[in-house]
Each structure stands twice: as C-alpha cells, then as structure tokens.
C-alpha cells in the first residue's frame, strides 16, 4: 500500500476519535448530571448508610470524568475552562440557586452575596443557560427602572448573559451604589432596553386594607420586624375572612416567615433538616391572633419564606390557596471551599412541615378551582389589581367555614 493509501485509514481514525470524543463528553456529562442531581436524594432515602452520602462523595467521580473527557479530546484543552463550564452545567441542573465559583473569584463573590439584592431589588436566576427575572421588590431601583417578573435578561452592558455564569451575573447586580447597568431584556417576545442604577432602598413594609368585606394583608418581604408589624396591623380586626397576599415575595428570612405563621397557628410548625436527616432547628407558634377563615394568594415567583408561610397555613389552619402554584424552593445555601480553590454554593438543608414531615422541595400547587392567572400583560394604567379582584371573587363565592385552630 502506498503512502497515500496508508494515510487514509489514519485520517479516518482521527475523525472517529472526534466522533467518539463527542459521545464520551455527552455520556460523561449525563452521568455527572444524574449523580449530582441525585446526591441529596441518595442521602435522604438510603436507609442502609444512614444518609452519609453527600455531594463530596461524587467529587472523586467528577475528577475521573474530567480525566476521561480531556483524554478523549484530540485538541489540547484548558482544564480550568473545562472544569468551570462543566460545573456551571452541573449546578444549573441541581437547582437554579446552586453556583460554582472558579478559583480567584471566591472572595469577590462572597462580598456580592453579602450585598445580595440590596442595591438592585431584583432576583435573577438561571436555568438551562437562560437568565430570567423571578421577582422585583417594590420601591427598588429595579422597579423604578421598569423591570418586570418573567423578563429574560439577554445581556448586561453589551455582554450576552448566556456567556455569563450565574456568579458573575449576580456580582454585576450587587455592584457599588451608583453603578450603571445597561440591560437587554426580552419581554413577551419584544426586545426592551433598560438602564438600572444601583442604589440602597428600604423594603416595603406589610400593609392591610379591607376590600369587599375581606381583610387583605400584603406581606412584600420577610425581615426581623415583619411579625410584629403584622400583629399590629391585625390588632382589632374581627372580619370573617383574611387574605394574605404573598405575590412576588422571593427570598427573605425563613425565621421571620415562621414567626408570622406562629401568630396564626400553634404547636410545632416545621423544622430545618440537613442532608443527614438531622433537625437543625424546630419552629413553634402560639397562634390565636385571628380566628376567622384564612386564604393565601401566591404566584410563580413566591418562594422561600413565602412558601413556608403558605405551607404552614394550609396545613395548620386549613387555609385555602389561590393564585398560581409557587416557585418550588425552600432551603438554606452554604458556600463550600473546593480543593481547587474554587467555591460551590449548594443547598445543604431544607425546610420540612410537621407533623407529616414533608419536605418543601417542590411547588405548592393551587387546585384548579382556586387558580387565578397572575401573569399580566403590563400593569393596568388605572392602578387596579385584576388578580386580587378575581381572587376575592372566588373567596366570596366559596362556602364559609371557621378556620381550624
């Protein structure tokens, strides 16, 4: 066989390696996704090892998978870039709150976490590579700039959000007061450009009003003084029905949510449980603040403390639930230092309801007859609240029954 003939099989083998490389990469990432996503389930459901499994167990396998991927590449690869990209994908698959921070960026991200959304008032998450707005705080710079729930954040300061990992996106939104961010948004199929100036702001406080004979308690955020404010607002209210509006409430203090729940319900309300099924904290309430029927109004952005309060009231005082199913996340995050120098922010404990002991790890769903579409195509110019009006109509049409204390 001549030199040209000998060269052809070698060229074919090279193309074969390229195809095999793609297959190995896909299979390896699928393997890691499955194991990482099931790490906690294995920790909580495997009775034989007593819940000793954790994500640390899979880091060894992770290293083996990376070696396999790098060994299958024909071209030279940058190990750091490969690790960062793969970890971004894995944490995206775990939940929208998990974050991988590469070495060299851990300290700056820790500082950004301390700021949180105090300078922006917007909660942005990322799923399947798409950054989107979960909630916008009332009275915040984000609200003043015109951001809306469900906006897709396509770019920040001219850079595509798809190429921007979640840690960097959050760091941008937690920048110094006075920073200017030019946001490219996609809203209901249209491109919208927004200028966001970061600044300090005061979260809105709970408010109360009577609408059509129903008391409406609006809780826009959960903080250290929320329970005391709610107690003061409801002092003397003797109406038959109370609607607690938790739309757009994403984040805040879980302890504050339990404190508010404890105003209405007595006994053990819930607990914080780690990966090894150990109760880290138990929450109790005295109840007795209000004796009428209680209803809760949520939307798709209601998460964390809003979900805790919703779950406790549904279980403990038989509250009816209106609006839309909640976001589906109530847990605590911890930043773990990796041997590489990077950081992994992951869910290390979750909240459970009692006495059933059900984990709050999914959306709290609204029954079909209580469903109100909270997705609106822009705010009504007349200042009306059609979602609240529809919810009140359903409440007034429902048969009345005393709440179970």
Image: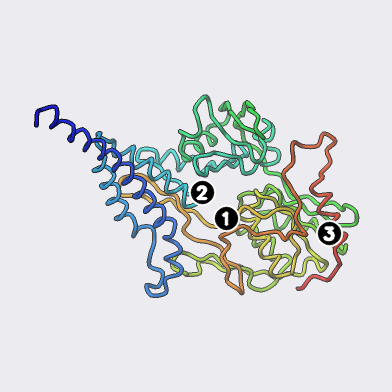
Q: Is residue 209 above or below residue 49?
A: above
Q: CA distance from mark 3 to mark 2?
A: 34 Å
Label 1 SS: loop
Q: From the image, which quarter does the C terminus lie in?
A: bottom right
Q: Which residue is under mark 1?
A: 329
- Identify the mark at residue 97; answer none if there is no mark: 2
The residue depicted at 35 percent of the width and 38 percent of the height is 104
Answer left or right for 182 relative to 61: right
In the picture as drawn, the residue positioned furthest to the front comes out as 1
Q: Is residue 314 above or below residue 228?
A: below
**Residue 37 in the image: x percent, y percent?**
44, 56
- Identify the mark at residue 395; answer none if there is no mark: 3
Sequence-wise first label, 3 or 2: 2
Label 2 SS: loop
The residue depicted at 86 percent of the width and 67 percent of the height is 400
Q: CA distance from mark 2 to mark 1?
A: 9 Å
Sequence-wise first label, 2 or 1: 2
**Residue 169 in the image: x percent, y percent?**
50, 36
């Amino acid at each position: 066989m001549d030199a040209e003939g000998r060269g052809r099989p070698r060229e074919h083998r090279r193309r074969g390696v390229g195809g095999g490389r793609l297959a190995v990469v896909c299979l390896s990432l699928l393997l890691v996704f499955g194991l990482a996503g099931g790490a906690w389930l294995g920790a909580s459901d495997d009775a034989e090892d007593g819940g000793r499994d954790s994500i640390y167990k899979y880091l060894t396998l992770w290293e083996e998978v990376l070696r396999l991927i790098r060994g299958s590449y024909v071209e030279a690869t940058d190990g750091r870039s490969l690790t960062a990209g793969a970890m971004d994908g894995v944490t995206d698959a775990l939940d929208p709150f998990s974050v991988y921070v590469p070495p060299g960026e851990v300290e700056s991200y820790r500082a950004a976490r301390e700021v949180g959304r105090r300078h922006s008032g917007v909660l942005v998450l990322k799923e399947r590579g798409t950054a989107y707005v979960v909630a916008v705080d009332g009275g915040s710079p984000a609200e003043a700039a015109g951001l809306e729930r469900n906006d897709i954040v396509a770019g920040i300061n001219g850079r595509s959000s798809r190429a921007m990992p979640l840690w960097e996106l959050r760091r941008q939104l937690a920048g110094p007061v006075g920073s200017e961010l030019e946001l490219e948004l996609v809203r209901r199929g249209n491109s919208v450009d927004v200028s966001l100036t970061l600044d300090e702001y005061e979260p809105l406080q709970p408010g109360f009003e009577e609408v059509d004979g129903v008391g409406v308690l609006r809780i826009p955020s959960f903080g250290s003084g929320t329970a005391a404010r709610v107690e003061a607002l409801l002092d003397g209210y003797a109406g038959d029905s109370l609607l607690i509006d938790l739309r757009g409430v994403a984040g805040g203090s879980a302890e504050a949510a339990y404190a508010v729940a404890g105003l209405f319900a007595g006994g053990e309300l819930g607990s914080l449980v780690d990966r090894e099924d150990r109760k880290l904290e138990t929450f109790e309430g005295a109840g007795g603040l209000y004796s009428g029927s209680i209803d809760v109004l949520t939307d798709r952005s209601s998460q964390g403390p809003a979900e805790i309060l919703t779950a406790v009231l549904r279980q403990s005082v038989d509250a009816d639930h209106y609006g839309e199913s909640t976001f589906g996340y109530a847990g605590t995050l911890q930043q773990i230092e990796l041997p590489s120098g990077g950081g992994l922010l992951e869910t290390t404990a979750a909240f459970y309801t009692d006495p059933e002991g059900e984990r709050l790890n999914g959306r709290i769903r609204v029954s079909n007859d209580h469903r109100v579409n909270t997705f609106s195509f822009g705010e009504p110019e007349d200042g009306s609240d059609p979602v609240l009006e529809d919810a009140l109509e359903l409440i007034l049409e429902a048969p009345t029954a005393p709440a179970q204390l």
